[in-house]
Amino acid sequence: MTVPPALERISDYVAWHAQHAPAANVLVIGEVRTSYSMLAAQVDSLARALLAAGVRRGDRVATLATPHPDFFVAFLASASIGAIWVGLNPRYQREELAFVLTDSRPAVVLTRTRIGRRDYADDLTVFQESLPGTRWIVLGSDPVPAHCVALTTFLASGEDVGASDLALAREGVVGADPAVIIYTSGSTGRPKGALLPHRGLVTCCRVQHRYWATEPLRSLNFFPINHIACLGDITCFTLVAGGCTVFLEQFDPAACLELIAAERITLWGGVPTTFLLVLRDAAFPGADLSSVQKIVWSGAAASPDLVESLRALGKWLGTSYGMTETVGSMTFTGSDADLDALSHSVGKPPPEYGFRIVDDAGLPVAVGGAGEIQVRGAFLMLGYWQRPDASAAAFDADGWMRTGDLAMTRPDGNVVLIGRRQEVFKSGGYNVYPREVEQALEGMPGVKLAAVVAVPDDVYGTVGHAFVVLEQSGSLSEADLLAHCRLRLANYKVPKRFVVDADLPMLPVGKVDKRELTRRASSAAT
């Protein structure tokens, strides 16, 4: 399998593939297919317009859109001239959008004004008042409010920017420059904007290629554009490898199955929640998955039952671990991963990444010991946008980035995630790791998903509350769950309450919303 070239900037891969495979498809949405030569022309046209609008190296360019080729053209055009791109999730409410916009203060915003049943015209008017110097450009055929201009008009304004001016702007961009600000989910407070460099996206995509590449590479992308899974793990990865990304603007299980068959998807990626929903869909038994070569997930652990269901499809399975600040995955399972490794570990770190697990004193822990994952390398985030204190706190004096994730290494070298440092709680003086308890519950036949949060307790200081989703309603009682945990966990780890629910609240990227569960548990305890 051909190894992608090591280029300076993530945007360089557009011209490289346009030269080597100009007619190959790179982006697909519905019936619209974009070749590499077409993408290069679209990126150049928008880059010229941005330069004509006064956008320079270090300025921000934001985009409010669904997973659609428009967002990727905006990202590549911005990054190619040294601007820093910011993705905005259409599901954000006005206050959430306002925070990201006022924090990043973009020079230009490329936006949809109507998505589904939601009209953003009033929101955009409010944002314009707080960002008077920002240019507002409307994508597609959406209605154009008074203070905005259509994309076609904006592109025409850049026609006088010559090829030499465009080349000069791009020559000044280096791999260490930031290409994007990705705001964290904000599940524990106001989001922070992680500055991710060109070299980070390039490095992580090339390493990921070693594990996830298919031939041909045709990926499906339904993640929100403000998430690293959408931009880095899928779209940039597929670009670097010279493949084709097929977009689905809103996740829908039946639509996923239709696109996998119609577009001959070879790499099927997601989070465990999306796979569960697809497997439960009425269309799944008759679905054509013959094109799929690899199935991969990240962002959360998959239960043994889910892994078994996916293994039954006869495809290569893999999982990984990463976070926004690491730009890409830091660990991967290999081709030899068995059920235990796939459901209870996140694999091993690649040799070129600095990766260690340390105790509170910063000393490496022994195999089987719990500690914090720390990573080091030039590919990592550059820091947090306008948050010098948070940026300094993220790294130690030797350049190791503190992830806040707790883990242990098994004797076979696979890494097991235990939980977030802020999630670990003491019960009766003992440390309790929620992920350990969740895995014990998810190992019980009939349990589909479990989430454990901490709540205050008069006797023990803090205790665990477990929220459990069953395969079949009414099949297990709270007493059954309690008995199962008592057989497998020390008494201080056993949750003091079990809540059996039909579903759990989810963040937009498919992770369990533990902040909401904590609120529910705390309300029930008072």
Image (cartoon, helix red, strand yellow):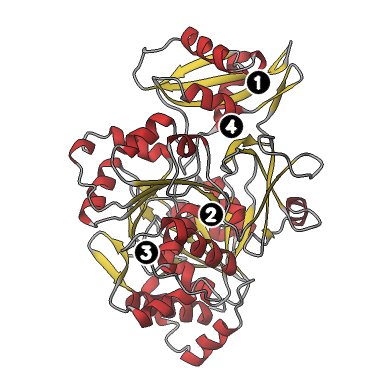
* Kind of residue at disc 2: Val
User: To which residue does mark 1 refer?
Assistant: 455
Residue 400 position within the rendered picture, expressed as x and y whole percent measured from the top left: 73, 54
Q: Which mark is residue 69?
A: 3
| Mark 3 or mark 2: whose residue is earlier in sequence | 3
User: To which residue does mark 4 refer?
Assistant: 515
Task: Tell me which residue sits at (38%, 29%) in the image.
Answer: 305
User: To which residue does mark 2 refer?
Assistant: 126
Location of the C terminus by quadrant is: top right
| Mark 3 or mark 1: whose residue is earlier in sequence | 3
For this orientation, the residue located farthest to the front is: 411
Q: Is residue 133 visible in this depiction of the protein?
A: no
Q: Contact (CB < 8 A) between labels 3 and 2?
A: no
Task: Tell me which residue sits at (42%, 79%) in the image.
Answer: 16
Q: Contact (CB < 8 A) between labels 2 and 1?
A: no
Q: Residues within 10 Å of mark 4 (few under 14, many from 20)?
A: some
Closest to the observer, 427 or 46: 427
| Mark 1 or mark 4: whose residue is earlier in sequence | 1
Q: CA distance from mark 2 to mark 4?
A: 29 Å
| Mark 2 or mark 4: whose residue is earlier in sequence | 2
Q: Residues within 10 Å of mark 3 (few under 14, many from 20)?
A: many
Mark 2, mark 4: which one is toward the viewer? 4
| Mark 2 or mark 1: whose residue is earlier in sequence | 2
Q: Quadrant of residue 187?
A: top right
Residue 108 position within the rendered picture, expressed as x and y whole percent measured from the top left: 53, 68
Q: Is residue 23 left or right of residue 470?
A: left
* Kind of residue at disc 3: Pro
* Kind of residue at disc 1: Val
Closest to the observer, 501 or 402: 402
